[in-house]
Amino acid sequence: MEKKAPKNWRGVLRQRDAVRWELPIDYMDGMRAPGLIYADEAMIDSMAGDMAVQQVANMATLPGIVGHALAMPDIHWGYGFPIGGVAAMRTDDGVVSPGGVGFDINCGVRLLRTNLHERAVRGSLPEIVNQLFRDVPTGLGRGRKRKRGAAIDIEGALAEGAAWAVENGHGSREDLTAIESGGCLPGADTSKVSDRARQRGGPQLGSLGSGNHFLEMQVVETIADEEAARAFGITELGQVMVSIHTGSRGLGHQVCQEYLGVMQRAMETYRITLPDRQLACAPIRSPEGQAYLGAMAAAANFAFANRQAITERTRRALAHVLDRSESGVEVGVVYDVAHNIAKMERHRVNGKEMDLCVHRKGATRALPAGDPQVPARYRAVGQPVLIPGDMGRYSYILVGEERARRETFASTCHGAGRVLSRGAAKKKLKGVDLVRVLRDKGIVVRAQSKAGLAEEASEAYKDAREVVGVVERSGIARVVARVRPIGVIKG
């Protein structure tokens, strides 16, 4: 039976330092590893009675887990794993859990840099935002309209990811050199993706979706690390950037939903007992585990293709409104990073190199300088780490540090993290005209539903500055630059 969360976690957690809190392995029967939570004291106090910390303990019961069950400072309650959860399993006797990846497989963030300055776009900003809103479908289930009965062939997107999108006219091969895993996760098995998943996802290729997904025009507000900023193509304050946050849409959701059922049955077959059914899993090397990993990789590739298609639509929208050729408006990919994924990686644990399946649920990779997986252009400084805040304040660009590789399986947080549920946010902001509030801050916003904006207001999220502060103080990533929003489109 699942354990109830205590009213005050301070009585359970052991404080290691100002930003690290250990959840002892003897906190709960069945834990195979201790937990480790990255947070400051105020964050820990705000988690009183929070089930997200209990979910860290539940993660630690998964067979094959090594090191710690980790939680980043954007931790909040999720399905199975908490959002901000990281866990690595041995590939020989460990398990894979869809709840450790999430329903939106390879939901991630892509950052684009432009050769534009805020002063050059400010006068045209409403028109640019309107054009982006027309060109990039948003909203629940929305995608491109198609004729009844018309087939959409997404086999290439499932197998080849962003490269397939480029081959079909969405961008250039240069884009592929600045995407995690080159925009294609190895091991994709398209035969493990159901017809229903394909039907849901096909029309949605090139769309944002709803909820916390967004396309945001931003300007560089501060630069903290000039060397890394130059490597990333960030050259001056006021430079216009574009951030895209979306994933595998209905296709990924369907894959997760279907394989949760497969995993529930597999647990009976392999006699796996866990404190939470949402952690349903199967041995990595089992037929069920391999089928899920193949389908998950295919869904991840679809998400890479999705963000690639949106990138090209963004380029064309900017060129159209600013009345320039596409070569006149330069839009390059800084980086694209996944934050809902399970990846086969090699890490050192207790002095020994191991092949691991690293689950990142609302967490991103953060590789340090010199790592061969970092794109060549960034290898001297490290991998870009993209941490969105909220649509009314600021977001951050960081770079991975060596300590992340040693301590967190090269992982860090993925965003600010919620403090209010969607329902609570809507209740708190009832009657508030958020479009006007944002306009008064110089931010133009378009959304399918004004009421839905309340779910994503600044009040619903932790302050990204505080979350990123914990990351920096922990030594797993450092700040390169901060950007602020000027134009936002949401579902």
Image (tube, rainbow, N blue to C red):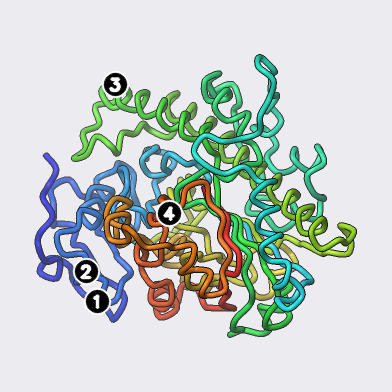
Write down the residue under mark 3.
269
| Quadrant occupied by the N terminus | top left
Q: Position of residue 485 (x, y in %)?
A: 57, 69
Looking at numbered disc 4 in the image, what kind of residue is underneath it? Gly
Q: Are marks 2 and 4 in contact (CB under 8 Å)?
A: no
Q: Position of residue 410 (x, y in %)?
A: 49, 62
Indicate whether 92 appears above or below 233: above
Q: Position of residue 230 (x, y in %)?
A: 72, 79
Q: In this rendering, which labeled residue sits more in front, label 3 or label 2? A: 2
Write down the residue under mark 4.
362
State the residue lying farthest toward the top: 149
Write down the residue under mark 1.
42
Find the distance from the CA under tag 2 to the CA under tag 4. 19 Å
Q: Are marks 2 and 1 in contact (CB under 8 Å)?
A: yes
- Residue 177, numbered label: none
Which SS class for mark 1? helix
Write down the residue under mark 2.
46
